Image (cartoon, coloured by chain):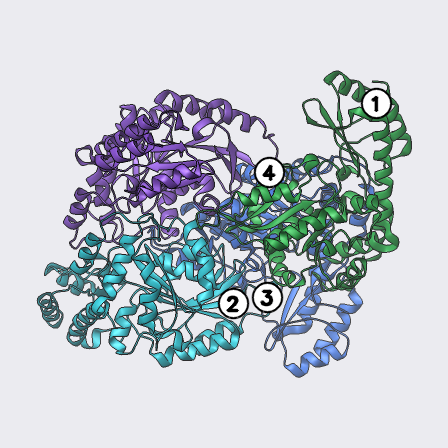
Chain colours: A green, B blue, C purple, D cyan
Amino acid sequence: MRFFSDNAAPVHPRVMEAMAAANHLDTAYDGDALSQQLDQRLSEVFDTRIRALWVPSGTAANCLALAALCPPHGGIVCHRDSHIQNDEGGAPEFYTHGAKLFLAEGEGAKLTPDSIAAVLDAIPDDVHRVQPHAISITNATEYGRIYSPDDVAAIGKLADQRDLGLHMDGARFANAVAMLGCNPDEVTWRAGVDALSFGFVKNGAMSAECLVFFDTKLADATLYRRKRAGLLLSKGRYLAAQILAMLDGDLWIDNAIAANARAQTIAAAAGERAIHAVEANEVFLRVTPDEAAALRAKGFDFYDWAPGEIRLATAWDTAEADVAALAAAIGAL
Amino acid sequence: MRFFSDNAAPVHPRVMEAMAAANHLDTAYDGDALSQQLDQRLSEVFDTRIRALWVPSGTAANCLALAALCPPHGGIVCHRDSHIQNDEGGAPEFYTHGAKLFLAEGEGAKLTPDSIAAVLDAIPDDVHRVQPHAISITNATEYGRIYSPDDVAAIGKLADQRDLGLHMDGARFANAVAMLGCNPDEVTWRAGVDALSFGFVKNGAMSAECLVFFDTKLADATLYRRKRAGLLLSKGRYLAAQILAMLDGDLWIDNAIAANARAQTIAAAAGERAIHAVEANEVFLRVTPDEAAALRAKGFDFYDWAPGEIRLATAWDTAEADVAALAAAIGAL
Amino acid sequence: MRFFSDNAAPVHPRVMEAMAAANHLDTAYDGDALSQQLDQRLSEVFDTRIRALWVPSGTAANCLALAALCPPHGGIVCHRDSHIQNDEGGAPEFYTHGAKLFLAEGEGAKLTPDSIAAVLDAIPDDVHRVQPHAISITNATEYGRIYSPDDVAAIGKLADQRDLGLHMDGARFANAVAMLGCNPDEVTWRAGVDALSFGFVKNGAMSAECLVFFDTKLADATLYRRKRAGLLLSKGRYLAAQILAMLDGDLWIDNAIAANARAQTIAAAAGERAIHAVEANEVFLRVTPDEAAALRAKGFDFYDWAPGEIRLATAWDTAEADVAALAAAIGAL
Amino acid sequence: MRFFSDNAAPVHPRVMEAMAAANHLDTAYDGDALSQQLDQRLSEVFDTRIRALWVPSGTAANCLALAALCPPHGGIVCHRDSHIQNDEGGAPEFYTHGAKLFLAEGEGAKLTPDSIAAVLDAIPDDVHRVQPHAISITNATEYGRIYSPDDVAAIGKLADQRDLGLHMDGARFANAVAMLGCNPDEVTWRAGVDALSFGFVKNGAMSAECLVFFDTKLADATLYRRKRAGLLLSKGRYLAAQILAMLDGDLWIDNAIAANARAQTIAAAAGERAIHAVEANEVFLRVTPDEAAALRAKGFDFYDWAPGEIRLATAWDTAEADVAALAAAIGAL
């Protein structure tokens, strides 16, 4: 009964089927029939004309977006606990050729216009200081918190006022949209987002994430950057197939609803132990070392986030029975 | 009847089956049971202790190898027509942070100790000049030519004398080994190769290439570089599964034998039209525009390499009947 | 009466004379007779065999040192208020190809083993996290505080334990040594420093700083990096002349003693207004906007450091009369 | 009697005087009164509104220009024997973050529209290939050849047609203009040049070169890049003073006329030995090893350019007597 990571979950059968169905000769790289459908298909999803590029990892999607929004001599405001700062091995600095991440505060890894402005206002407009060029937010956040359309729009307004690009790391975008019950456009481009890392791997795909540009002119140079980073896989049709399968019949939403629901069950059992409001598919709990050991003894696996804190992640395939057992075990602590 | 690119070929059924068999919960990134087998399995293949890292593209494998062998202020000798120079969108410069490619000559895109030494000898040992740190050769080459163990060893000796690293781009390594009929160690580390991009995608895999370090100490920093480049896919088990399936029962050799044989059939029909000796799975022919049109009119697809030159590539699944038809069509020109 | 910046001060007459004396034909770059003396002359100053490279700016010295100590995928621990973090326009990221600065705390911009260890201990030894490779401290600090030999040695010990390089930004190294009254070796290599940016420009030179490697093997690649950064000036003899003139007769110490003494006079007048202990040539004072205006009305120029805080910098040529007037004006607030 | 390098020459007395005259307190970096005059003064020289930045080396000027004209994923066409390719230690790749130099042919290191177009036409418009973004020419060239206004305009037209930026490396721009007898605008912006590295150091200055942007919008980001490269010297007034002194009374032209005249004297003596037309201050001669030894035995110093080829460089201060002696010695071979 593993709650360690949504990356550990298997690939959804419909994704596997779509990859099998794509297993025939076709044009290499992104010239195949499936890759050629992405722009149109995602334009429908987002109800506006977008440009979409598949990439094989979320880090790649994030960092290509940052490179499109920020020059090497610029900087990007992000949360102190964001994935791009802590969990990508310096990939943002690699892809941007050394842009600086400016670290902002915010409960639950959520930025606010105030916390961003506090960082911006501390940077003199001076050649000696790296100047900010973009903001990056994560929805859902690293702590499973969600930005509503209004939350994003408030940040989008600030970005617009300060002439900054706005990127959304959507490794768990599906979980956010599923919980919000909104259309995906409401929480992205209508709220000022220029580029979205639309995540599928944590939600049932195998190796395909989608970089979506709402500011479509950013896509042109990104095609070259993707190739230059070794990310233009030669048999791209298998990545496009994954994305299209996830979009078909709103599988991405259904998977996220399932994962979110499991997390809610855990949250209900956790009560006051929950460190953050549970809004997506992650639950952070306060437990003593003895309690953590007791849970592990019963066969539950999870991530030791920090001293006295554990993270439990659910996925599209997390069994209700496992969650029920976990909830009981937490209640019994 | 497409002879356009081996990248256009489908994925071998045994690889698809291996990926399906891996479709269960396991540890993320490269902590899974399959990824953990790579070092051991490839050490057996190469009859020495190696370090192996999966990556999702050949460009990624090549450029991580180059970054391990050459500092940003150094340079790498490669063929003027090499993939790293012409077909990777500047990825070598990206991964090495701006190392310079020194372009050497050689028939059939094959370097020789003399052609390499000619480049090296023209570079004064002087702080104003970028200094060479590595050599990169491609086996089989971009023109389907093969380096024998002796060919490689002669270059390996030069590399050793000049204190240079030696990388082999093996996007079509299987085709070379299959044609040589040697063991893979003979044409790599025993001949002085430090790092090999062991290609599987053109030979029946989907999205997994393997970077093999014979100079094993190079692997440590490369683990960080792979992550930093967004190449550490979160569900790495599906890449490891592909590589293991290709190695199992020597599928990689069998597939290459098949592709090479088809190329030989074409070569036999081509006679004097062949521009390069046909030693792997690529055939380059001299044809007039009218002849090219005639072939296309009969349903054959291929790459217009240069004015008056076409490239025909075979793959693991190229049908004998298609090749027979092509041979007849060439004969009829 | 300007107390705005020690960079605003003129060049010392003996430095100007040395440059004039060097104004004859000599070998270009660093092949001239003066440049060739630097290793020997600075080895005497530091009582050990060192390698020395002139560079035209302190930022260049700092960042070449960081590039020698940290790979692109690594990180460097420095103070949150350090010059490399705040005042070099992202040059550390440029020179290191994107290494990350880890920001540590400490009163007066001074790091301590504890504040450094707090940062280090929060970084898991994990490929997803940028790993630390070096520590950079500034002596005297951005707030005019000084690391004693014992202070540095404690950090040097930590660096040794954690296998990290240790860099000292010595833009105001002369002020520190002058105040400590120690030999320069005591506060550098004997305390574990691997590379020192030995600053001269703020202390009476024009455009020559000296990068000193105590870990001499770091110098070899740095020669290439210096050239590659456009920092190997073609008439280097004029830079070497400046450094040699500053060292001759301990001009560098005498100049620093003078600047420090002027700062002490201001500090004595400032009393409780001083925000930091005054140990070098900078004085930070709490003043109201009205008080700042009053000082300016009397002809004093200074830097508005932060709301309610001003910085006053003295230099080798600051007149005693000006300082006396300033002290009186502060007393009269 | 040294004819080794114009970098070996001393600094002109009027430049030394100007630096001495600047030796008083002033604002740091480029906020001083002299630096603030550069835009206006150089706008007069070039008869159009330009933006000018001092930098301490020609390599820095060249590479900041290239970084302004070409993104990291792009490429720059230059001559195979150009300084940026051969003599800057990889600085173009450093400053541009890995852009590729495309090497073109041309007699005397001069590019022509045809030689450039040959390179451009060989690059498919394809994401797998690095795309060209700029052309860089050197005037006078590495072999002392000169581009006339018409020569440059023909290349400028090609640049315009292909949407490429045009950079001129003017390390010996003064020698070119002096020989052409034209106004500096005729051979630069009126002929399509976007950015000029206006060299002064080889022509009598100490450490100040001037990067001139005719496409003035390129200057804004370059201010940040200059700082980020550690090139924004803190006492910039001494660099501005050099440039202004060189411009005052057309000292830059007078110095170049003198150097060019000395080269003509040598050329006249050399006759058929001259490898390239002598148009600036460099003379390349065919000499046997014995002849080279004979010249050295008479006290002449020069650069062994290639087997059987020597380079003789004159400078602003080369004595007529020395040249006469050299001419006689060459005649006596």
Q: Are marks 3 and 4 on the same chain?
A: yes
- Quarter of the picture containing the C terminus of chain D is bottom left
Residue under label 2: D132
Q: For the residue labelled by badge 1, is the local secondary structure a helix, a strand or a loop?
A: helix
For marks 2 and 3, give the CA distance: 33 Å
Residue located farthest toward the top when viewing the structure as drawn: A290
Disc number lying in front (4 or 1): 1
Label at residue B277: 3
For marks 2 and 1, give the CA distance: 61 Å
Q: Is residue B235 above or below residue C263?
A: below
Return the residue nearer the eye: B333 or B60: B60
Give the image location of residue B173, x and y in percent: 63, 53
Three-letter code for the amino acid on which mark 3 is drawn = Ala
Three-letter code for the amino acid on which mark 2 is drawn = Pro
Residue under label 1: A330
Location of residue D310 (image quadrant):
bottom left
For marks 4 and 2, give the CA distance: 40 Å
For marks 4 and 1, give the CA distance: 45 Å
Three-letter code for the amino acid on which mark 1 is drawn = Ile
